[in-house]
Image: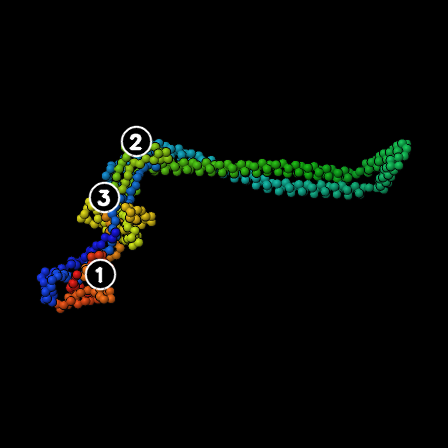
Amino acid sequence: MKKLQIITAFLLLIALSTVTACSPLGEEEKEVERYVEVEKGDLLVTVSGSGNIETAEDANLSFGSGGRIARIHVEKGDRVTKGEILAELDIDSLELAKQQAEYTLTQAEVALTQAELNQKAAEYELDNALDQKDVLELALLKTQIDVRSAEHYLDETRDIYTWPDIETAQKDVDNAEAFLQYALERNLSDETIAYAQARLDAAEAVLDAKRNAYDTEEVAIARLQLEAAQMAETQAQKNLDQLSENIALKELSVEAAKAAVEQSKQSAALARKSVEQAEKDLKEAVIKAPFDGLVASVTAEEGDMIPSPTMSPKQIISLINPTSMELEVEVDEIDIPEVEVGQEAIITLDALPDREFTGVVTIIYPLATEVGGVIVYNVKIELNVPEDSGVRVGMSAEADIVLVRRTDVLLVPDHAINEDNEGNPVVYVVVDDDLEARPVEIGISDGFDTEIISGLNAGETVLVD
């Protein structure tokens, strides 16, 4: 519900009560009339709510690694500054673990470097083998050309030394072969076939004899050159085949070297993570204050064994910021539409009735709750208080959220406002010991006093019904 409040810069109410039966005109009246002087002041329209003070900034601190507590530097109630060391674990075993992880990382990095060198060496050998293959293919092609050339040279040399009698002997062989084929096809007598075979054998013997008789030294050399070229071609092909097998092996070596590099990279990455984890464990073996604050509790002692936080997290120190507080209040559904984030709030505490604190609306929760049949919405207010203010977590507090504020405006009591026949606001002003009905323009009201925008001046006296 709205709490209607006025904060005046001056004493607004200067009461003039006529306790006699005379009016300002000197006439006797039966009723007592009251008059006030128009003054300037401040006017607030607020929405109120109550709740309990809570800390806006707190932290439940624990170690990020397990071990034995070596030192606890604070006690409950101590004030600490941001970054201050609050507690420490025994770090001997953690430092040893870090050194071992660093040694393993060094070994992994050396192995990776060696694997990369092996890969480069394997790739270099493969490139050389591929280059050599080009050379051997060229050599094979050259030997093939040499064989063709030797064959051609031998043919030419033989042609030079082919005399007519060799040609004649060749014709006799051809004729003998034809006669033998004829006898076989016609199924002539065995004597005839035997004769034809003997004739062919004799003709071939004569041809061979004539060829051998006329096989010159130059023909023999040409024949030897052909044989040498053929042997060179065979060897060139063999060399190329062997090199192809060697290339296949070197390609496998390159792939194996690449796989070794990848495995070494993974090993180095795991070792690096182990070092990072060891460094993290060392770093988290110390609890530092995340902000300036007050130690609210210490729930462990020096010498206690702390399990790994992955198994069972254990709170060691609770820290709060006593200068950063918040208050959550309930606001009626009728008033909540006028509440906005960023509005000022005036907070008073039951335990400190003579002090006021200012805050700011930070959150308006969207979900409603029902309290005693009334729909309300929770509103959070943050406030900063001095360290020596005496404000404590849990204290009962009431907040007045300022919806509208008017500063240094003309004010009159609500009961001084009347209406004319047309429903317009008027105020009865004392003028020359007489009452004058004067139209006015009014502004906001807090339920006790009303803002006068125009129609009156400070210092004038008005009638209050």
Residue to which mark 3 is pinned: 395
Mark 1: amino acid: Glu
Task: Please tell me whether residue 337 is drawn above or below residue 153 in the rendered image.
Answer: below
Instruction: Report x, y in % for residue 325.
Output: 26, 46
Residue to which mark 1 is pinned: 451
Quadrant (top left, top right, bottom left, bottom right) of the C terminus: bottom left
User: Label 2 vs label 1: CA separation?
Assistant: 67 Å
Q: Earlier in the sequence, mark 2 or mark 1?
A: 2
Nearest-to-viewer mark from 2 and 1: 1
Describe the element under mark 3 as helix, strand or loop.
loop
Instruction: Report x, y in % for residue 222.
Output: 75, 40
Mark 2: amino acid: Asp
Residue at (29, 54) in percent of width and height? 338
Determine the image quadrant of residue 17: bottom left
Q: Earlier in the sequence, mark 3 or mark 1?
A: 3
Tell me if 233 is positioned left or right of 345 in this view: right
Tell me if 161 is positioned left or right of 441 in this view: right
Outermost front residue: 30
Describe the element under mark 2 as helix, strand or loop.
loop
Residue to which mark 2 is pinned: 304
Instruction: Report x, y in % for residue 296.
Output: 26, 39
User: Label 3 vs label 1: CA separation?
Assistant: 36 Å
Residue at (30, 54) in percent of width and height? 337
Q: Is residue 369 visible?
A: yes
Mark 3: amino acid: Met
User: Label 2 vs label 3: CA separation?
Assistant: 35 Å
Outermost bottom residue: 432
Task: Please tell me whether residue 16 is drawn above or below residue 242 in the rendered image.
Answer: below
Q: Are marks 3 and 1 in contact (CB under 8 Å)?
A: no
